[in-house]
Image (tube, coloured by chain):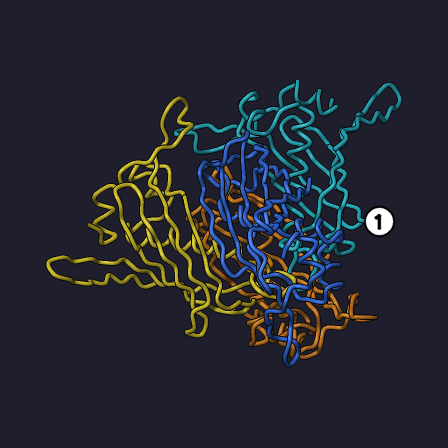
Chain colours: A cyan, B orange, C yellow, D blue
Amino acid sequence: MSPTTRGNSGAGKTLAKYTVTRTERIHWGDCDPAGIIYYPNYFEMFDRCTTLMFEQALGMTKVNYLRVYDFSGHPCVQTNAHFHQPTRFGDDVVVESTIAKLGTSSFEVQHRLTKNGKLAVEGAETRVWVRRQGPEAKSIKAHPIPDEVVARLGGR
Amino acid sequence: MSPTTRGNSGAGKTLAKYTVTRTERIHWGDCDPAGIIYYPNYFEMFDRCTTLMFEQALGMTKVNYLRVYDFSGHPCVQTNAHFHQPTRFGDDVVVESTIAKLGTSSFEVQHRLTKNGKLAVEGAETRVWVRRQGPEAKSIKAHPIPDEVVARLGGR
Amino acid sequence: MSPTTRGNSGAGKTLAKYTVTRTERIHWGDCDPAGIIYYPNYFEMFDRCTTLMFEQALGMTKVNYLRVYDFSGHPCVQTNAHFHQPTRFGDDVVVESTIAKLGTSSFEVQHRLTKNGKLAVEGAETRVWVRRQGPEAKSIKAHPIPDEVVARLGGR
Amino acid sequence: MSPTTRGNSGAGKTLAKYTVTRTERIHWGDCDPAGIIYYPNYFEMFDRCTTLMFEQALGMTKVNYLRVYDFSGHPCVQTNAHFHQPTRFGDDVVVESTIAKLGTSSFEVQHRLTKNGKLAVEGAETRVWVRRQGPEAKSIKAHPIPDEVVARLGGR
């Protein structure tokens, strides 16, 4: 994994995009009878990548950042993926994940998965920063992403 | 499961939509430490629903329809989902799956998942009817969906 | 699902065994490139069966029985399985799950999975009834299974 | 991963044990509402470890060793696991996998999973070297493990 903060400078405005790159092996058990990856597994992979992006930006594992920033998680409210070419067990793929948008309490992540340098899958997800609330903390509600987290992700 | 073929008749044109409805239980093992479903599992659920739609329309299980219609599968090339409200272990949800578009060799399925009558998740997927080809049958290629299959799905 | 309480009466001793039977469909996504079920999925199936056994015996879903009996779960401490013949996508299998032993705070469940009436898999698991305790309720500890639960499972 | 071949020399007999060690991260999506790993995922982990053991011993990925040694796989016929202490998302665990027995067409693998140096899980599995046979290659049958494979795994 290698975090990269890219500066795209415009007229008086700097938009930095936080990006992490990670290699994943496609395993036998990830594949279906057609011998290719069973596509729901890509969403597990992307979820791992988003978590690892936060872990790197914040310098601690998820179990700790949930506690330190006192929130319940960053559930996905919307996601999509385009599968350009299949991957097979034994393939080592590279996933480049980028914070594409950072809002007040939501953010977007884009995942670009390549195999031997060729684009295989593109994914995108919108997530919300949430806290538990109400009786017995049973419901969750959007909460502003802390300034420190925004700063570490290169935002605003 | 109850298949329904709905006729939406317009001026001189009949568009029939093939729909199947299915109840799924959310299990403990489908959920994450937040106590709600781990969202990649929705894509497994939708894949099951699409397969069951074909099984009902064609009157045989997938292992048989792959053989009878001599093809390799209907891989997903694009999918998206919107998560409106979470589901939890013990929830019984209803998934209504509909063939939204039937092309020459591709088709679209829409999934509408409700919990206690309220919309919880909307999903959509584009799939391609494929056959193996080439040396050792290693690559797959789009192939026209057989007329009989199209007819049974209420298309064209 | 059909719960059965069988009485095996001996000399002055009655041992009742609580049994539930359930049908499960093997899905495309449960299978690996060999076209047969990826065996870790059997353990998910057995876990579902154990939960459903409790749900039937106690007359409520897991989310409710955890609350009503005020405990944290029945984690598995030991499990084993023998795979006698493979199952494939489209197979409908029958799983008969039985409480084989009911101790003070632990119990054993045996699962017998048949396909077309022939034994395909045998599984067994030992589980412990646990409660959270200590600072921030972070650790779990074995706790006696409530008498009411024991009675409903046909024990002691 | 670091393969180790240990020689346990006895009187005129050398029994070498092939061992590979691998680190695995427990992910959010591997865990259940109790916040600990959903135990069926350990079997996926062990399956990955067994495959990687073969990949290292044979110097090629599974997709290649299935082709080179012309067989259909090494399905699991029996497995068991003891869960001594739970693991949580963010935990990095070490799995040491060892060929415990090498028969004519079957073998046993033992997995020892530690967390912070303390034993967390012990697993064992018996697998069979199989080839497809019969009409349409639909059934599988045990086949002797090739001498070269046995030698590379330190056996006989």
Looking at the picture, how far across and down is residue D120, in whole percent?
A: 49, 37
Instruction: Determine which quarter of the picture holds residue D65.
Output: bottom right
**What chain does mark 1 sit on?**
A
Placement of D94 over or under B27, stated as above or below: above
Residue density around tag 1, few if under 14, some if 14–19, many if 20 or more, within 10 Å: few
Residue closest to the eye, D145 or A28? D145
Q: Nearer the viewer, residue B65 or D57?
A: D57
Residue at image x 71%, y 25%?
Answer: A153
Percent of width and height locating residue C60: 32, 49
- As drawn, the residue found furthest toward the left would be C12
Picture layout, residue A72 above or below residue D39 = above
Quadrant for residue C128, please give it.
top left
Indicate whether D117 appears above or below B153.
Answer: above
Is D136 on the left or on the right of C67, as rendered? right
For the question of whether residue B127 can be seen, the reply is yes
- Rendering coords of residue A78 (x, y %): 64, 43
Residue that protrudes farthest toward the bottom in the picture? D135
Image label count = 1
Q: Is residue C30 visible?
A: no
Give the left or right position of residue D90, taking residue C105 as reference: right
Element at label 1: strand
Task: State the image coordinates of residue C91 (x, y, percent, origin top left).
Answer: 51, 69
Residue A130 lies in quadrant? top right
Q: Which residue is mark 1?
A: A118
Residue under the point 38% across and 53% down: C50
Quarter the N terminus of chain D occupies: top right
Figure quadrant of the C terminus of chain D: bottom right
* Amino acid at dot 1: Lys
Q: Residue furthest right?
A: A11
